[in-house]
Image (cartoon, helix red, strand yellow):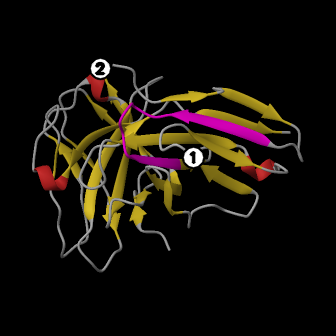
């Protein structure tokens, strides 16, 4: 079946511009994670959803970052007033149920802020 | 606070040689430890997790709570093992901490 998909795959934004990154998890997956991966680093946790509930947003670096999953399926990560330090690959992952289930990762969205 | 440390950015070995990718963690409780792998132009994927005590593609990893380590080992490296490897930790499955990764290069 289809895996996790993310769009757009690449995004170039001018500093100060707002961007929206979309994640389509595997159908029926309850858990959804967002990560930020800077160049040469490992993925860094941003936020976690269980269905539509955002249970952990402690990794969001500032109030310019906002994530939602209103119907418990598709999720959007929004970054307002982008800064150069926001340039990174944004990864989405989903898992079937909370707990000891494998996370399936999407291909990521590469964001470049000029 | 850095919870997962992978001290080697790059590890080069010859085909058929043993390989060990190091991972140390800092957490006082009983975390779950994982190894993820990313092959060239592919997505990040789970390789193995310590609770399963399994061997995947010839790789094993033992959790050493005394040394707070979860090193990944394979007795005979293959060229197809060349990839980025990330060690990860979770204590509640709501949040995962990843190391900075080790690039394994297996030379023919």
Q: Position of residue A101 (x, y in %)?
A: 26, 47
**Which secondary structure lies at badge 2?**
loop
Taking the magenta stretch, the answer to whether it contains residue A26 is yes
Residue in the picture at 15% in, 33% down: B76
The answer to whether residue B104 is seen in the rendering is no
Q: What stretch is highlighted in magenta?
A: A19-34
Asked if residue A77 is positioned above or below residue B91 in the image, the reply reads above
Residue A39 falls inside the magenta stretch: no
Report the Cα–Cα distance between label 1 and label 2: 50 Å
Relative to B29, residue A63 above or below: above
Identify the residue position indicated by label 2 in the image.
B108
Q: Where is residue A113 in the image (x, y as percent from the top left)?
A: 81, 40
| Residue A70, numbered circle | 1
Pointer 2 local density, CA inside 10 Å: few below 14, some 14–19, many at least 20: few
Chain letter of disc 2 in the image: B
Give the percent coordinates (x, y) of residue B56.
16, 36
């Amino acid at each position: 079946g289809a895996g996790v998909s993310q769009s757009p795959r690449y995004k170039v934004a001018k500093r100060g511009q707002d961007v929206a990154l979309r994640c389509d998890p595997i159908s029926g997956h309850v858990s959804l994670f967002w990560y930020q991966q800077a160049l040469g680093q490992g993925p860094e946790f941003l936020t976690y959803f269980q269905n539509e509930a955002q249970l952990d947003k402690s990794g969001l670096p500032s109030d310019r970052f906002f994530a939602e999953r209103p119907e418990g399926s598709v999720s959007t990560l929004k970054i307002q007033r982008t800064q150069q330090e926001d340039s990174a690959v944004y990864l989405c992952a989903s898992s079937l149920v909370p707990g000891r289930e494998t996370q399936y990762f999407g291909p990521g969205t590469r964001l470049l802020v000029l | 606070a850095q919870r997962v440390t992978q001290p080697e950015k790059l590890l080069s070995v010859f085909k058929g040689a043993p390989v060990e990718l190091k991972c140390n963690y800092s957490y006082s409780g009983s975390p779950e430890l994982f190894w993820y792998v990313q092959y060239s132009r592919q997505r990040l994927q789970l390789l193995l997790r310590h609770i399963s005590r399994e061997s995947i593609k010839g790789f094993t990893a033992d959790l050493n709570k005394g040394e707070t380590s979860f090193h990944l080992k394979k007795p005979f490296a293959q060229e197809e093992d060349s990839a980025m490897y990330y060690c990860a930790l979770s204590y509640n499955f709501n949040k995962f901490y990843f190391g900075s990764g080790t690039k394994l290069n297996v030379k023919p």
